[in-house]
Structure formats: structure tokens, C-alpha cells
Amino acid sequence: SSRPASMSLMSQCGEEQVAGEYSKHYVTLKQIGKGAYGCVKMAYRRSDRLLTVAKFILKEKVGAQFWVDGPDGRRVPLELSLLLTLKHPNIVSVVDVFENDKYFQMVMEKHGAGMDLFEFIERRPRLDEPLLSYIFRQIGQAVEYLHSLNILHRDIKDENVIIDNKFHVKLIDFGSATFMSKDTLFSTFYGTTEYCSPEVLAGNKYAGPELEMWSMGITLYVLTFFVNPFSDIEDTIQGPLALPQLVSEDLEQLLRWMLCKEPANRCTVAQLMAHPWIRQPVAIANYVFQEIVDCDRHEANPEMYYSGSLGSPRSGSPVSLADPLAKERSNPSEVA
Ligand code: ADP
Ligand code: MG
Ligand code: MG
């Protein structure tokens, strides 16, 4: 299956993306994943070979309402300013920021092997409900934190969540995020149609949290059944919610509550986090990543293959990027 596109503008990056001070500190590697993102690449820090993920944000593609004043008075994209400010175990952190005439170069921590939940789901993981709950509650924790700061992510979906081999997940991609306030309604939708709520698809204005809860509901549904609940916009607005497999009563109740067509009756993030299905006990130490999802050894144990001076490897001896084992799959080729 192919990845649905965000409505936020996707930009093509040329060689100009690495120009400037950034390249004095980082060596840019091949595109991440299947290369669908011209603007997100692996990069390693020259000083210690720390492997990171660099996102190149083309200034001219950042919409007028997505700029804020940075600490030194210069204008910076909100996506960048938010990720620099936010500090949460389930939100990706920024390591470094540079800019040239055309681009901001945002260097992020590389979480795990760089697998997002879209790819995770494509591999048909053998998830049981406690493990599913463990993964999903972390997205809930990130969203609860964001909403407490009056921040809306607005593009929550499987590919904007990355997972490591301990099932620790982090939310990424704040390119559609915004601040909300009690008395302001939004009229433009910036996320991904498949994850958009019926009332917003129908053209109604929205406050925010209720839209976010719908996209969380779609994400939970996709994680549970590996298919989308609705076939198109019409179906999202009108269609009944069908569950293709039997799940626990608690999970079914939660899915129906999050995907409630009437926004006023939809589950809130506080209700989500208090829900028995979210609060169920999970013996996470009993789950082994490579038994749950098919992966190669670098994905099962990325810490053994990539070395950096920050954080010591948990097992085995570290090997450098030049090690052939590390190149086996990613085969990094320098573009800079
Ligand atoms: P876009 O705004 O173009 O969707 P994203 O920020 O979502 O860009 O990044 C695109 C993809 O790159 C993600 O879906 C994910 O697969 C990967 N990615 C982005 N940031 C990271 C990161 N810090 N660690 C690992 N993978 C990442
Ligand atoms: Mg994205
Ligand atoms: Mg984006």
C-alpha cells in the first residue's frame, strides 16, 4: 500500500539543502525509508559520528501562518520552534539547527532504526492487545502533553510516529501543528484526508482536540486491524464503523468512542488516558521486538551497529558506520 499524502506541501530538495554551516558539522546520507521524502535524510555528526535524522525545511514552502518569532527575534518555522521547546519522552527531540538562504536544517535524534508505524504495520506485527495498548498509550501521553500546552499536532497518523526495538514510540512531524485557543475555531484542515474527522471533512469549523482524537482513533484502528476503517470521504461522513475482527469489549468500546461521528460525544484525551483498555497492565519486558515483527538484525539491535559518543551501546561492541554489517541494509551514500 502507498502512504497517503499530507495536505501540507511536500517539497523537493536539491543539493542546496545541505549548503552552509550545517555541512561543516554533518555528513548527509541517503534518504530515509523508501526515499519518498526528499527532505528527510540520515546524517552523521562529523565530530563523533553520531547518526541523526536531518529534515530540510524549504523556507518558501512554509505557509505564512506557520512562522513564529525565534528567541533572537528572527523568524523560524513553528515546526522547528515547537520541537526545540517541547520536551517529552514520546516526542522526538532536536539536536541541532542550521539555516541557509533557502532551508532550515533541523537535525533530530534518530530513534531506533528509523522505523515508523506505517512500515511497522506493513510488516504485519503479531500484536496482542496489551502490547497494542502499550504502544498506543505513548501516543496518548504525547497528545495529552501537547493539549495541556494548547498545541495541536493535526497530523497524527502511523507514519508520523517512530518506534524503537523496545516498543518505545515518539511523535514526529510538527509541520501541521498550531496553537489553539478557547475562542478561536479553525476552518482549514492541514493533515491527511484519511485521518480527518467527518465534521471537518463536511466543511465545519473545528476547535481542535476533537479532530485530534478522531485521527488518534483512526491510528488505533489501523494498528489493530491493519486496514483503514473508511474507504473515502463519503464513507467517513456517513458510513457505519465496522470492526473486521473480534476484539475485547474494552477495545471495541474505545474505538467506537474515539471514532464517534458526533464531535461533542467523542472521547477526550483525558477520557482516553483514564480508559481501562489504556490502563491495562502490560508485561513489556516479555515482548521481544524481532519476535513481534520481522526485521533484520540492524533493526532488532540498532545500538550494536551505529556508534556515537552520546549514549553507550546496551549490548555487544559498537562498530562504526564503516562496518560492512551496518552498510548491509542502509548502504549509505554521501550526497554532500
Ligand atoms: P513530512 O513532513 O514530509 O511528512 P516527516 O517529518 O514526517 O516529514 O518525516 C518523513 C519520514 O521520515 C517519517 O514518516 C519517518 O519515516 C522519517 N523520520 C522523520 N523524522 C525521523 C526521526 N527523527 N527518526 C527516524 N525517522 C524519522
Ligand atoms: Mg510526516
Ligand atoms: Mg509534515
Image (spheres, rainbow, N blue to C red):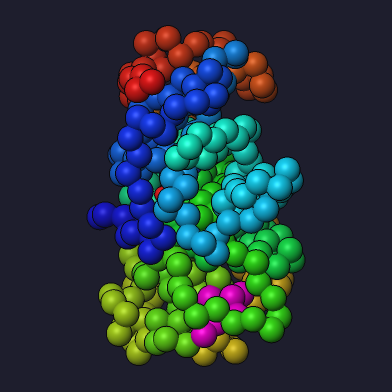
Q: Which residue is drawn at 38% across and 64% down?
A: 7
Left or right, 49 with respect to 278, comes to left
- Residue 287 in percent (x, y) is at 55, 42
Numbered range of the magenta stretch: 205-211
Residue 40 drawn in magenta: no
Residue at (60%, 13%) from the top-left corner? Answer: 47
Q: Position of residue 31 (x, y in %)?
A: 36, 33
- Residue 20 spot, x, y in % from top left: 50, 26
Q: Please give left or right for residue 114 compared with residue 9 in the image.
A: right
Q: Is residue 270 left or right of residue 233?
A: right
Locate residue 127, reporting x and y percent. Answer: 46, 53
Q: Foreground residue, 58 or 185?
A: 58
**From the viewer's perspective, is residue 155 above or below residue 299?**
below
**Quadrant housing the C terminus:** top left
Residue found 47% across the figure and 87% down from its top? 204
In terms of image quadrants, where is residue 332? top left
